[in-house]
Image: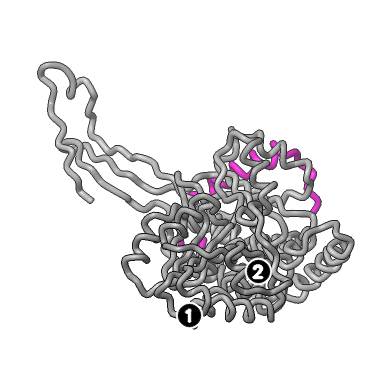
Amino acid sequence: MTETRSIVELAKAAREASRKLALASTEVKNSALQAIADALIEEQAAILEANQQDCKEVAELVAKAEMAKPLLDRLKLDAAKLGTMAESVRAVASLDDPVGQTISRTLLDDGLELQKVTCPLGVLAIIFESRPDAVTQISALALKSGNAALLKGGREAARSNQVLLETIWKAIRNFPELTEDALILLTEREQINSLLSLDNLIDLVIPRGSNELVRYIQSNTKIPVLGHAEGLCHIYIDESARLDMALDIVCDAKLQYPAACNAVETILVHSKIAPLFLPELFERLTSQGVELRCCERTKALLDKPDILLATEQDWQTEYCGLIVSIKIVDAVSQAIDHINLYGSGHTDSIITEDRKNAESFLNRVDSAGVYHNASTRFADGFRYGFGAEVGISTNKIHARGPVGLDGLLSYKYKLYGCGQTVSNYSGSQARPFKHKKLV
């Protein structure tokens, strides 16, 4: 579909669609989501063909060093991943409707009741690179939470994004409450700056992509931005850790999907177990093609000529690939200090059998996700039971960590009265408020 409307016209159309969508019933939204999941499977051949064309072009750019390999890794779809995408949409459909839920009720006075009720934010703008699965995740969560969305994907996934959104549009055409303007695909890079200027029409911007993309958006809009600039995740192996468990967790966190923002980038190892743990870790990681960048103590202990000495920059780098930094520390407090200094506030894990050390780590590390004896790869909305996620936030205001339905909601206050006026509650003869909590 060729879009001829201006960015302002598109945003206004999305705003109008959001007001209609906000009133859609739970049954309508869930039925539409099930129809979308069915359509993803039915249109599998067309979706994968489009994705293969995108991947072919990007592979050529990667070979010429004109595009980063992690973008290609995130771009690829196959039948299994498409099935997971459909499952994620169904998972969102199975969740309780978050809209119109009463958070609290307060009796201000007889016949005067105040209710705090959840409501959609309105219009979302999601700007993302590669990752066509973001289209289905965002669309499902936006529809279920009653929000319209303007989606701007990267040029590397243009065909994939287009066919995915066309599949979604076809699936919801039988539901008049959900118009195509509830989900609008933007295709021109030049539209981004115009989009970021529409603080009167767009309620939240969610960037998903490189550090440069996120930082650019954060610096160039008055619209609230939800997201994370980096996913610099750590795993600390404590002196009481079970080494077999630690090896499995580290390898999962680095190798299961190296391009993910929740893959581990720095491994911290207690000096007491380093002589036993690090040689085994070296063998496990290097056998899978991982490049190690190590502190001087680690390099000396391993005594391997092909190990690079870590620089100050390495402790601050999200590699998104088969590279990992390793540092030996002498106490859990040193590990915590290192993470709080260099980490991005995304997800960090401690491997230990010492409950006291675990609690100290979980309480003192200032990140959206802090784990004990678990891989950082669990930082994901689907794995958290959110059905899907629009992204992972390292913000501390509004939403933090994987952002599902709850992060796409605001609330309003509804006051039900029977003729009360403020003058009755003012002056020397003021009637007192009861302020009785009902919920």
Q: Quadrant of residue 110?
A: top left
Q: Is residue 65 visible?
A: yes
User: What residue is shown at x 40% (from left), y 48% (from top)?
Assistant: 118
191 or 323, which is in the foreground? Answer: 323
Q: Say what amino acid the circle numbered 1 marks.
A: Leu
Point out residue 10 in the picture as x, y percentages from the top left corner: 69, 42
Q: Residues within 10 Å of mark 1 (few under 14, many from 20)?
A: many
Where disc 2 sits, the SS reads loop
Q: Residue at x 11, y 16 (%)?
A: 428
Quadrant location of the N terminus? Answer: bottom right
Task: Please provide percent x and percent y for residue 209.
Answer: 67, 54
- Image coords of residue 120 (percent x, y): 48, 48
Q: Quadrant of residue 298?
A: bottom right
Compared across the picture, whether 413 is left or right of 180 comes to: left
Q: Residue at x 78, y 72 (%)?
A: 46
Magenta range: 1-29
Q: Earlier in the sequence, mark 2 or mark 1?
A: 1
Disc 2 crowd rating (10 Å Cα; few below 14, some 14-19, many 20+) is many
Residue 189 x %, y %: 78, 45
Q: Is residue 180 visible?
A: no
Q: Which dot marks residue 243?
A: 1
Q: Identify the residue position indicated by label 2 in the image.
A: 258
In the rendered structure, does residue 28 fall within the stretch colored magenta? Answer: yes
| 216 drawn magenta | no
SS assignment for the magenta stretch, majority: helix
Q: Is residue 283 above or below residue 356?
A: below
Element type at marker 1? helix
- 276 horizontally vs 419: left or right: right
User: The disc labelled 2 sits on which kind of residue?
Assistant: Pro
Residue drawn 78% across and 68% down? 51
